[in-house]
Image: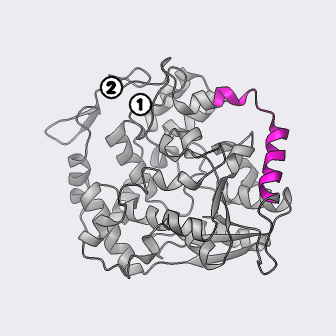
Amino acid sequence: MKYCKRCLQPDTRPNTHFTVEGICPACDYYSRLQDVDWQERYEILQDVLAARPRKPDQMFDCIIGVSGGKDSTRQALWVRDNLGLKPLLACLSYPPEQVTERGVDNISNLIELGFDVVLSAPAPGTWRQLVRESFDRFANWAKSTELALFSSVPQLAIRYDIPLILWGENPGLQLGDLKTLGKTGYDGNNLRYMNTLSGGAADWMVEAGVSNEALLAYRYPAPEEFEKHNLQIIYLGWFLGDWSLINNGLYSAAAGLRVRTDTVDNTGDLRGITSLDEDWVTLNQMIKYYKFGFGRITDYVNEEIRMGRLARKEGIALVEAYDEACSPSYIADFCEYIQISVDQFWGQVRRSLNRDLFDIDNGGKITRKFKVGVGL
């Protein structure tokens, strides 16, 4: 395990490769942004949009996947108010046991702001079954739900005959998932190769006994379907020079976004602005830390270090304190939902522990072998 020499990104992130100088892809990309002509990029975006005009019978210019959170709220407002486009907002709804009141309020806020929003909700019984199966097989309850979340937008784009999909950040450039890189910095059609969607992503669900009919909501459209319907994903974040966790949160909060009030000790969320529509992703961030050696706080501080708002030494202290943060109440609620005990939950977490990065004693206590900012 090695760390980026500039930020606190370890090389254990899936699909990432450091430069020969020991710099992570996100820091390398950010350093090149200092010379970007943002007016030129805006003009490129105008040319891209002009090449894909709304058809006479098309009600919307584009489709944007939304959760009601900071990124999607900012995208929706910027597209409408700065580009003059009429977007259809597509939201995949969580079941009642999972969605937060905060999340419902934030979707309502988008509707009150004047947007057209279409909600889809996969069958709750299948959803619960697959969440349990995801956790049992992979110690990653969201493996199935992320498939549905990512798949819903292009599925609805096909259904409503809207060939232009606007997405947020480019995960290849801004996070380091290099397999998602397309022909240009804004081409998002290789999103299908990200770690979540690649490699027969739904095959294990069939093995679990779920019928193909029940899995329709979890199927990302094939390349042939993209080509048939002329679908194009555009990474909007590539055109915005101030795209970041905190900037998007501030922008959206000014437009009525409701943020978290829980403490960073319970959430690992420094500003209360991530994953607002549900709480169980905090579990996955903790488990991600035990698998790969980095969690939610790492992603926060890396952005802040790159932008010069946080010293690397200060970031190390935050990562050491909060990267495995998760409220016991969130764990208990999740366990009740998939009908396991808290002890069973921790048993599965410990079985998935990366023993190269962590030790575990006879009492089940987990301690890291690596030193944050240094590695092994």
Q: Residue at x 41, y 79 (%)?
A: 124
Q: Nearer the viewer, residue 72 or 237?
A: 237
Q: Nearer the viewer, residue 230 or 362?
A: 230
The C terminus, quarter of image: top left
Q: Quadrant of residue 288?
A: top left
Work out whether residue 153 can be spotted: no
Q: Residue at x 50, y 17 (%)?
A: 21
Q: Is residue 32 above or below residue 229?
A: above
Q: Is 317 on the left-hand or right-hand side of 229?
A: left
Q: Position of residue 72 (x, y in %)?
A: 66, 59
Q: Residue at x 25, y 66 (%)?
A: 340
Residue placed furthest toward the top: 21
Boundaries of the magenta span: 30-49
Residue 287 is one of the magenta-drawn residues: no
Residue 43 is one of the magenta-drawn residues: yes
Q: Position of residue 7 (x, y in %)?
A: 53, 26
- At label 1, which amino acid type do we have? Asp
The N terminus, quarter of image: top left
Q: How many marks?
A: 2
Distance of mark 2 from mark 1, alpha carbons?
Answer: 13 Å
Q: Is 72 on the left-hand or right-hand side of 366?
A: right
- Mark 2 or 1 closer to N-term? 1
- At label 2, which amino acid type do we have? Phe
| Residue at mark 2 | 370
Q: Secondary structure at mark 2?
A: loop
Colour logic: one colour
| Residue at mark 1 | 11
The label number, if any, that marks residue 364 in the structure image: none
Q: Is residue 21 above or below residue 287?
A: above
